Amino acid sequence: MTFFLCVKTGSGKSLVFEMAPFLFDFIESKQYRKTVTAVVLVVLPLVALMRSQTKILCSRGIKAVYLNDSLTNVPDSNDKFSMDDIRNRHVNSVFGSPESFVCKQRDLLKELGTRVNAIFVDEAHCVVKYGRRAKKNTPAFREAYGRISELRSFFRNRVPIVALTATASKDMVHKIKKDLGILQCLGVIGDPNKENIRYHVKVVNGGLESDFEWLVNLIRREGVDTPRMFFFRHIRHMGELFEILETSLGNQGYIVDSTGQKVRLFDMYHMKTDDDVKESTCASYNDPEGDVSVVMCSTSFSMGMDVKVVKHVVHYGPADDVYSYLQETGRAGRDSVSHCEAVLLKYKHSLNGRHISKNVKDYCKANVCRRVLLLKTFTSAPQPIKPLHLCCDNCSVQCRCCCGCESLASCNCESVESFILSEMESVSNAIDSESSDGSDSDISCEQSEDGDSDCSMEFTHRRPVPISDTDGD
């Protein structure tokens, strides 16, 4: 049976394919067995996701591997698997990219034959985003994504395909189903609205050093207690901000962990980051008590990572489309209880990139509910949440529940401020939003499909290098 599942980030979609081998084994054997022989394939877009999922499953005693160009094991896993282990059903979960399954490991899939119980396509929106041509005469960014439906031809006719995603409009759902060859599948389409995230847009000068002086002050003041937060968008900005933090903070940007090693409180994560840095960053963010507080990242960190205790997501410039923005801001508030915030810092010319959609530009310039503008692509009649001060910055101005004023006309109270904007207010010299009208007239840096900028790559390959005690602050 084919199935489509679209539910908001943090809902536990990964449990579907994590539990699947046990379910299929129980159906086949009619009993619970300690040795599970069912095999599922899981298609993921990024090696970092495969590595993370494999590590999690192996730690729980579930036999899992991930395929890239060849069979690879998680470096710190005690389980050693070979190709023969996969062929003989000694591995329950096999993770891989569409390129691995569709192109490089076709012989392995042919040998598996009828022994595969299901194919799961996680982050299924990538099927349309990466697998289709952006223009008629240009190739798809990742052609193999458009060929995933071929996988069924290697197995029995009724092997199910299950598509999983957090962000898909009605039109995109139809396109995904069509490209996967599962138009008649059953499905659950949920509401992507995360009510515990409050949305803000703030106009800034566009000078990184002045725009993020508040962050330097925050890390210097709070140290290891700095609230966890993400910063999304261009590699160029990540590298420059990293350099600003490292230069400004010196030793204050590090702490000494329980093993006596110096650990940096901030780091970068994008497609050009070294694998060991990615591994350490993921490990820290998977641990609620992890030491890394601030991560400057690209879209790579917005898919599938089970990050803990993140309440603040900051975009320096807009995402390309509302799908990406919801996916990226969804890194916050995964416990669905904590009040979190998504702040978009709009600098001069930042809305003029040729990949930025009209919906995103409308969101950035709006004086009406930003949540409604985000969600109207996905639901028919989205509404602001109550109380209004928890919805977005525009709704907060309309909210009267936090003051005793009888009407807007008689109210002189300030709206409820966000943590990030409060920090910025103490040092910011950002221009007034009214003076930015018509400022988006120049073209910004080109972007790759990963959301990363194709601008200068300086400072993009950084490893955690402890500084000596004699270095200055």
Image (cartoon, rainbow, N blue to C red):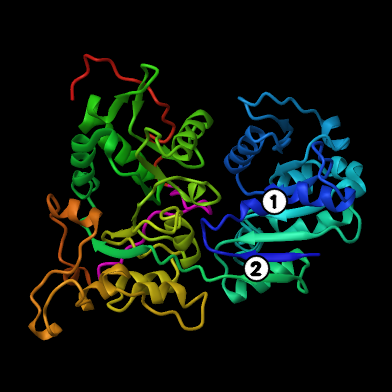
Where does residue 45 sit, x and y in percent of width and height? Answer: 62, 49
In this view of the protein, which residue sits in the foreground, 151 or 291?
Answer: 291
Q: With 436 as the anchor, is 386 left or right in this view?
A: right
Of mark 2 and mark 1, the one earlier in the sequence is 1
The residue lying at 37 percent from left, 44 percent from top is 236
Percent from the top left, x then y, of residue 266?
34, 36
User: For the residue labelled by badge 1, is the local secondary structure a helix, a strand or a loop?
Assistant: helix
Q: Is residue 168 left or right of residue 63?
A: left
Quarter placement of the C terminus: top left
Mark 2 vs 1: CB contact within 8 A: no
Q: Is residue 384 magenta?
A: no
User: Disc 2 marks which amino acid?
Assistant: Lys
Q: Residues within 10 Å of mark 1 (few under 14, many from 20)?
A: many
Q: Quadrant of residue 124?
A: bottom right
Q: Which residue is mark 1?
A: 17
Q: Is residue 444 magenta?
A: yes
Residue type at numbered disc 1? Phe
Residue beneath the point at 13% across and 55% down: 429
- Residue 454, given in percent of the width and then of the height, sits at 45, 47
> In the rendered structure, which segment of residues is drawn in magenta?
438-454
Q: Which numbered disc, 2 or 1, marks the residue closer to the eye?
A: 1
* Left or right relative to 215: residue 13: right
Q: Residue at x 32, y 37 (%)?
A: 242
Q: CA distance from mark 2 to mark 1?
A: 35 Å
